[in-house]
Image (tube, grey):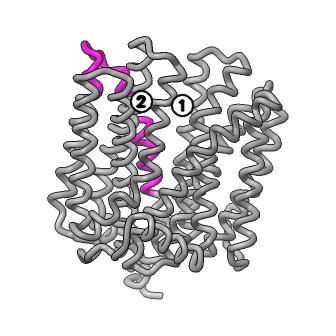
Amino acid sequence: MTDEAQDAPQRRWLALLHAVASLLLAYALLMVGNSLASTQTSLSLLADGVPVAMAGVIQSAYYGGFFLGGFAFSGIVRQYGHHRAFAVLAALVCLVALAQSLLHGSLLWLLSRFTNGLAICGVFMVVESWLNACVNNEQRGQLFSLYMILSYLGAGAGQWLLRLPFDQPGWPFIIVAMLFTLAIIPVTLTRQQPLPVADAPPGNLWRQALRTLRQLNRRAPLGWAGALVAGCFNSAYYAMMPVMLSQLHYANTHIGDFMGLTLLAAPVLQWPMGKWADRGNRAELLSRSALAVLVLSLILSQVLFTWLLLPLSMLFVCIAFTFYGTLSGIVNDAMPPHRRVEANATLLTMYALGGTLGPVLSSMVMGWLGPAGYFVTAAILAGAMLAAARLFGAARPIPHPLGLL
């Protein structure tokens, strides 16, 4: 093989990064701002004396908006293009953040969080369909792994902004609005349009959603089923892992350290998993990942009071948080290019539905079994993912250079 042939994949990858660099920069800014907004909302509500139960209802409105967001905005993308849809959605979040900086009230903030979730789901749908339109199947997993890495790093960076010496309680929301405004600039200045602008398909919102779900069920049933389970996984971790640690009598500062360290582990396997998926069968990789998480969950349920809890939890997050990226590759490999906007909207909608179910399921099992119930729930979900991957996925072997899974 000539040197030119050997360098061709690297040149294609660099060309791809150059094409999507502006979008990825904008997305990273969005993730920093969204992470800051979410945490600052909770802190502001508690500082204002809002009951914890009401604060939970207000924060759950975010997931309600997220559940509806993909299909609510898919028509805008098809009619006006990704650039304009991105700008509209980012501007909407800016308005919500500025409203939260000026006005207080439980009902207003509930509406703000719902609108925030609605717009953020639309942003995710725009970004994911944009990225998938720019890449072929051989590089899809690698590009999406980079997208997921930016998600987790941006979310972590947003938490560090809370350390800034804000003089007024509304200032963090102004910072959020500034970050979303900055994100609009690189996207609107980029020249590459990922998909041709087309008229929205006929029919009402729910008819379009059902049509896309039926098509997805024919072409990649593992996609929507796995996204539901992945949403349960991630939301249960964010919502119930701190509760489990509190039941284990961890101090609040130690809970924060534990969560921070485990979430730092989330990006570690995104890139190698993406490369392995591109080289082989994504469903087989998902199956092996689910099996690894199942085994880890059962072990963790037995070592809650030992030093093994932290390192094994980091490994647990490393693997479990790659589920969604692998599923996105499965869906976008299977769907035709002109249906990818709706396909990604469907994927996000199922993920959001799982996100609303995960904490409820986990809290019920923890009520029966105590702290170990969290990892028992995780084992059940991993078993469901494994069963879906075996039932709907192909059986072609996938190379694993390290032989870990």
Q: Are marks 2 and 1 in contact (CB under 8 Å)?
A: yes
The x and y percentages for residue 226 are 62, 61
Please indicate whether residue 159 sits to the left or right of residue 358 in the image.
left
Please indicate whether residue 171 sits to the left or right of residue 272 in the image.
left
The x and y percentages for residue 92 are 25, 44
Q: Quadrant of the C terminus?
A: bottom right
Query: Residue 117, located in which quarter of the rendered image?
Result: top left
Whether residue 7 is visible to the viewer of this picture, yes or no, is: no
Query: Residue 84, located in which quarter of the rendered image?
Result: bottom left
Residue matched to label 1: 260
Q: Which residues are magenta?
A: 146-173
**344 and 63: which is toward the camera:** 63
Please indicate whether residue 103 sits to the left or right of residue 136 in the image.
left
Q: Amino acid at mark 2?
A: Gln
The secondary element bearing badge 2 is classed as: helix
Badge 2, how many Cα within 10 Å: few under 14, some, many 20+? some
Secondary structure mostly seen in the magenta stretch: helix
**295 and 73: which is toward the camera:** 73
Whether residue 121 is visible to the viewer of this picture, yes or no, is: yes
The x and y percentages for residue 169 are 29, 17
The answer to whether residue 107 is above or below residue 30 is: above
Residue matched to label 2: 159
Identify the mark nearer the N-term, 2 or 1: 2
The x and y percentages for residue 317 are 63, 44
The answer to whether residue 14 is above or below residue 362 is: below
**Residue 151 sits inside the magenta stretch:** yes
